C-alpha cells in the first residue's frame, strides 16, 4: 500500500514540476563573498602565501577556486560520474528521475537521480539535503524547484564552480582547493585524469578506504572513463592510505604565524619576501645537515632592510628537530658570546678612552669577583701579546675586551646595550665582567636590529615585520653611539687583515663586496652566531641545538658564518664593486707608527681631536701575582688522585729578578710558571727581590680533602 501511495506522490510531482514557480535563489556573488577559509595566511610583500594556519577547527577550507582554475579533467570526471546530461537538462534530469521512480515502484535497486544542480541547491540550503529516513515529498519538491531556478539564473558554469567549492570531499576537506592540496599535493588546476577519477569516486562515500576508492574508480573506468586502472590503484595507495588530511606547514614560520594570525579568513600581509625566505631556509638546513654529527640541529636566520627596518626573511626554526618545530629561535633568549663586543669598544671610543690604534695587552688576567675568580680566555686558549684595538675587536680577543670594560665600567656598557634594544633582564652588577664576553641572554631579533643601527650610523629604530606593528623603542634619552664611532666600528668589522690573527685570511666572513661582520660563540659551544651588514642589508644567524646541549667543535666561524655568507651573497648579487660607506664629518685618516712594541705602521681612522702620529706603548712594569689572586679559594677534588692536582703559580715580574715565597719559605725564581702541590689551609704567597723586599703578595685558601690514591709519593 505504501509503495502505491508513493507512486501516486511521484506522479503528482511529475505533473506539477513543469510549473515554473518562483523560488528564492541566493545571488552567486553573495555566496562566493560569504565563503570563508578555515585558515588564515601569512602573505609576503607581494601577496604570495608563505604559510597557512587553521583557525576554524570545524572544517578544512582554503580559498574559493574559480572554475577556470580547475583542471578540465576534473570537470569531465565529475560530470561523467554525477550528471552525464548536465549540459542538456535545465536543473532536473526528468529521464533519470522517471527511471528511478519506475525501479522504485517495481522493487528494483535504484540509482540516484539528483543532478549537480539539485546537489548544489542542497549545499546552499541544508534543509533540502538528504537525511536519515529518506526525503519527504515536500522537501524533494522544494529541491526540484531550487535546482530549476539555479539553472535558470546562475547558468552551468556557476553551478559547477559552487559545487566544487561547497562540497565535502573527504573527511573534513571542504572545497576543491583543500581536497586537491591535502590529498594530491597540487592545486586544482594541476589534477590529471587519474587524480580526478579517484577524487570524484570519493563523493559517494567520502570516508571509504583507499581500496574501496580505487575499486570504485576502476568500475567507472570500465564504464567508459578514460584513465588507467593500475595507475589509479597506485595513486590511491600512496595518497589515501593513512594520510594526514592536514596541510603541510613550514616550520620556519610556524610560531610566527601562530602569533600573528588570529581569525579564520583574516590574512596578514608581512614585509617578508617569499623567494628570499626560501633561500635563507635552505641555506640553514643544508648547513645543519652537514653538522648533525656535531650535535647541531637548530638554527634561525633574520634579514633586515637597513633603511626601512623591514624584515625580509624570518626563519624561526630549521624543522630538523620534530619535537621543537614550534620553537621560535628568532625570539628565544640565548647567550650572546662575542657579538656584544662592538658596542663595548664603541662606548670606549665614544668616551675617548681608546682609539682604534690604542695598544691593549692580550695576556693572562684574573679578576676577583663576589662569585669567585674570573679568568677570561681566548677561543684558541692562547694570548697574542700587545695588539691594537682594531685587531682585538676584529679577531675577537677576550682579554682586551675585559680590560676595556674595566675602563668604561659595567654600568655604562649595560646602558648602551639597553639603548640598542637588548632587553637585559638583570641589572649591570648581576652580569659583572662577564658582560664583556657576552654573558647575557639576548635574542636574534635584538641582535640583528642592533647591528642594523650600526649600519645606520648609530641610529636605532624599530624593525618592522607587518604594517602597523607596535614596537616600544628604548628611552629617548638613552645613550647612543655617534656616526663617527659607528663608522670606525664598521671599518674594523670589515677588515680582513685585522681578523686574520684569529680567523685566517680566507673564511666565510670574507665577501667580494663590502660587509662588516662579527661572530660569537657562547660557553661550551652551546650557541654560535654570525651577524653583519652590507650597505643595504643586515643578516643575523644563530646555530645550535634545540635541547641546549654543547656542540662538538662548532664555532661561529664554522657553524653560523657559512649560512650568513650564503644569504648576504644572494642579497648582494652583482654588488662586487660596492665599496665602504663614506666617512661622516668629524673623522680623519692618519698614518700611525708605534714605539715600544713590534707593530708595523698603519693607516687609521680617528675622531677629530684624538688623532696620533705615534702611539707609545710601555709594557706593564709593575710586579704582579697573576695566579692565584688575593682572596682566591682553591678546592681540592677528592675523586682525583693527588698527583694530578697541581696549582700553577704565575706572575709578571716587571723585568726584575724575583722569587716565589710561600708562607715565609723561598720556593723558586718567579720568571717562569711554577707547579705547586696544593695543601689544605690558608697560605701567603709573595714575590720578593733578592734583598727580601716584597713586590707583590696574595693570600689564598685551599679547601677539601686529597684522594689517598697515589698520595704516598708526595
Image: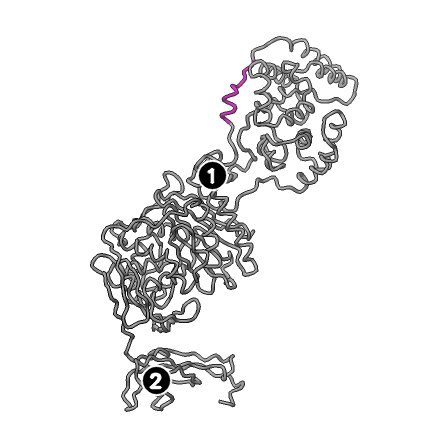
Q: Is residue 71 left or right of residue 348?
A: right
At a point 48% along the width and 79% down the height, the residue shown is 637
Disc 1 target residue: 42
Q: Which of 176/518 is in front?
A: 518
Which sits in the foreground, 704 or 134? Answer: 704
Tell me if residue 25 is in the magenta stretch.
yes
Q: Position of residue 188 (x, y in %)?
A: 59, 31
Residue 698: percent from left, percent from top: 32, 81
Residue 187, compared with residue 608, is above or below; it is above
Mark 1 burial class by Cα count in 10 Å: few <14, some 14-19, many 20+:
many
Left or right: residue 375 versus residue 194 is left
Taking the image as drawn, is residue 205 in sight?
A: no
Magenta residues span 23-34
Establish if 95 lies above or below 551: above
- Mark 2: secondary structure: strand
The image quadrant that residue 658 belongs to is bottom left
| Residue indicated by mark 2 | 685
Helix, strand or loop for disc 1? strand
Q: Residues within 10 Å of mark 2 (few under 14, many from 20)?
A: many
Pointer 2 and pointer 1: residues touching (CB < 8 Å)? no
Tell me the quarter of the image containing the N terminus: top right
Looking at the rendering, which quadrant does residue 106 occupy? Answer: top right
- Check residue 153 for magenta coloring: no
Position of residue 382 measured from the top left corner of the image (x, y, whole percent)? 42, 71
In the image, which disc is placed on residue 528? none
Residue at point 72% right, 12% down?
A: 8
Residue 85 seen in render? yes
Relative height, residue 149 to residue 321 (above, below): above
Percent x, y of residue 226: 72, 27
What colour scheme has been applied to the protein in the rendered image?
one colour
Amino acid at each position: 500500500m505504501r509503495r502505491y501511495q508513493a507512486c501516486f506522490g511521484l506522479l503528482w510531482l511529475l505533473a506539477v514540476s513543469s510549473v515554473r514557480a518562483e523560488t528564492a535563489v541566493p545571488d552567486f556573488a553573495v555566496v562566493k563573498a560569504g565563503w570563508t577559509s578555515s585558515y588564515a595566511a601569512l602573505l609576503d610583500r607581494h601577496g604570495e602565501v608563505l604559510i597557512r594556519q587553521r583557525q576554524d577547527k570545524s572544517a578544512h577550507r582554503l580559498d574559493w577556486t574559480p572554475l577556470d582554475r580547475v583542471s578540465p579533467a576534473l570537470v569531465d570526471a565529475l560530470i561523467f560520474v554525477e550528471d552525464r546530461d548536465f549540459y542538456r537538462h535545465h536543473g532536473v534530469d526528468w529521464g533519470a528521475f522517471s527511471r528511478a521512480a519506475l525501479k522504485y515502484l517495481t522493487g528494483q535497486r535504484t540509482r540516484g537521480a539528483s543532478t549537480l544542480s539539485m546537489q548544489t541547491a542542497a549545499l546552499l540550503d541544508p534543509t533540502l539535503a538528504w537525511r536519515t529516513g529518506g526525503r519527504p515529498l515536500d522537501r524533494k519538491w522544494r529541491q526540484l524547484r531550487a535546482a530549476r531556478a539555479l539553472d535558470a539564473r546562475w547558468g552551468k558554469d556557476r553551478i559547477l564552480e559552487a559545487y566544487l567549492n561547497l562540497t565535502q570531499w573527504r573527511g573534513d576537506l571542504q572545497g576543491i582547493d583543500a581536497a586537491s592540496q591535502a590529498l594530491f599535493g597540487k592545486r586544482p588546476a594541476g589534477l590529471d585524469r587519474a587524480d580526478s577519477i579517484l577524487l570524484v569516486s570519493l563523493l559517494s562515500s567520502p570516508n571509504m578506504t583507499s581500496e574501496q576508492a580505487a575499486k570504485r574508480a576502476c568500475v567507472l573506468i570500465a564504464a567508459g572513463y578514460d584513465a588507467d586502472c593500475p595507475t589509479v590503484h597506485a595513486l590511491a595507495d600512496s595518497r589515501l592510505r593513512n594520510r594526514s588530511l592536514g596541510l603541510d606547514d613550514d616550520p620556519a614560520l610556524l610560531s610566527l604565524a601562530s602569533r600573528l594570525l588570529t581569525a579564520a579568513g583574516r590574512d596578514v600581509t608581512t614585509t617578508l619576501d617569499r623567494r628570499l625566505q626560501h633561500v635563507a631556509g635552505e641555506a640553514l638546513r643544508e648547513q645543519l645537515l652537514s653538522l648533525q654529527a656535531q650535535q647541531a640541529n637548530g638554527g634561525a636566520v633574520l634579514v633586515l632592510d637597513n633603511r626601512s627596518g623591514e624584515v625580509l626573511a624570518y626563519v624561526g626554526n630549521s624543522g630538523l628537530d620534530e619535537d621543537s618545530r614550534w620553537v621560535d629561535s628568532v625570539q628565544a633568549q640565548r647567550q650572546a658570546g662575542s657579538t656584544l663586543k662592538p658596542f663595548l669598544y664603541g662606548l670606549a671610543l665614544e668616551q675617548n678612552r681608546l682609539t682604534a690604534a690604542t695598544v691593549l695587552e692580550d695576556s693572562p688576567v684574573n679578576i676577583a669577583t663576589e662569585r669567585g675568580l674570573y679568568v677570561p680566555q681566548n677561543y684558541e686558549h692562547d694570548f697574542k701579546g700587545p695588539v691594537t684595538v682594531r685587531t682585538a675587536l676584529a679577531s675577537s680577543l677576550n682579554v682586551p675586551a675585559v680590560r676595556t670594560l674595566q675602563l668604561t665600567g659595567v654600568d655604562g656598557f649595560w646602558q648602551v646595550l639597553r639603548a640598542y634594544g637588548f632587553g637585559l633582564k638583570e641589572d649591570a652588577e648581576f652580569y659583572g665582567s662577564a658582560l664583556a664576553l657576552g654573558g647575557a641572554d639576548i635574542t636574534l631579533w635584538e641582535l640583528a636590529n642592533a647591528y642594523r643601527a650600526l649600519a645606520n650610523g648609530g641610529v636605532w629604530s624599530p624593525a618592522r615585520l607587518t604594517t602597523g606593528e607596535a614596537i616600544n623603542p628604548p628611552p629617548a634619552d638613552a645613550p647612543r653611539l655617534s656616526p663617527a664611532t659607528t663608522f670606525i666600528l664598521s671599518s674594523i668589522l670589515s677588515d680582513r687583515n685585522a681578523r686574520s690573527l684569529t680567523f685566517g685570511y680566507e673564511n666565510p666572513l670574507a665577501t667580494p663586496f663590502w660587509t662588516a661582520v662579527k661572530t660569537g660563540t657562547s660557553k661550551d659551544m652551546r650557541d654560535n652566531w654570525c651577524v653583519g651588514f652590507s650597505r643595504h642589508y643586515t643578516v643575523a644567524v644563530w646555530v645550535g641545538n634545540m635541547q641546549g646541549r654543547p656542540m662538538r667543535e662548532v664555532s661561529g666561524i664554522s657553524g653560523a658564518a657559512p649560512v650568513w655568507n650564503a644569504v648576504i651573497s644572494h642579497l648582494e648579487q652583482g654588488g662586487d664593486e660596492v665599496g665602504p660607506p663614506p666617512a661622516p664629518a668629524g673623522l680623519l685618516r692618519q698614518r700611525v707608527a708605534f714605539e715600544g712594541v713590534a707593530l708595523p705602521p698603519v693607516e687609521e681612522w680617528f675622531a677629530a681631536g684624538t688623532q696620533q702620529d705615534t702611539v707609545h706603548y710601555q709594557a706593564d712594569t709593575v710586579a704582579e701575582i697573576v695566579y692565584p689572586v688575593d682572596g682566591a679559594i682553591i678546592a681540592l677534588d677528592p675523586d682525583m688522585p693527588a698527583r694530578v692536582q697541581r696549582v700553577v703559580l704565575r706572575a709578571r715580574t716587571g723585568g726584575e729578578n724575583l722569587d716565589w715565597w710561600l708562607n715565609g719559605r723561598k720556593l723558586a725564581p718567579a720568571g717562569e710558571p711554577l707547579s705547586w702541590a696544593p695543601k689544605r689551609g690558608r697560605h701567603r704567597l709573595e714575590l720578593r727581590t733578592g734583598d727580601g723586599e716584597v713586590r707583590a703578595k696574595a693570600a689564598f685558601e685551599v679547601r677539601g680533602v686529597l684522594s689517598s690514591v697515589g698520595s704516598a709519593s708526595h
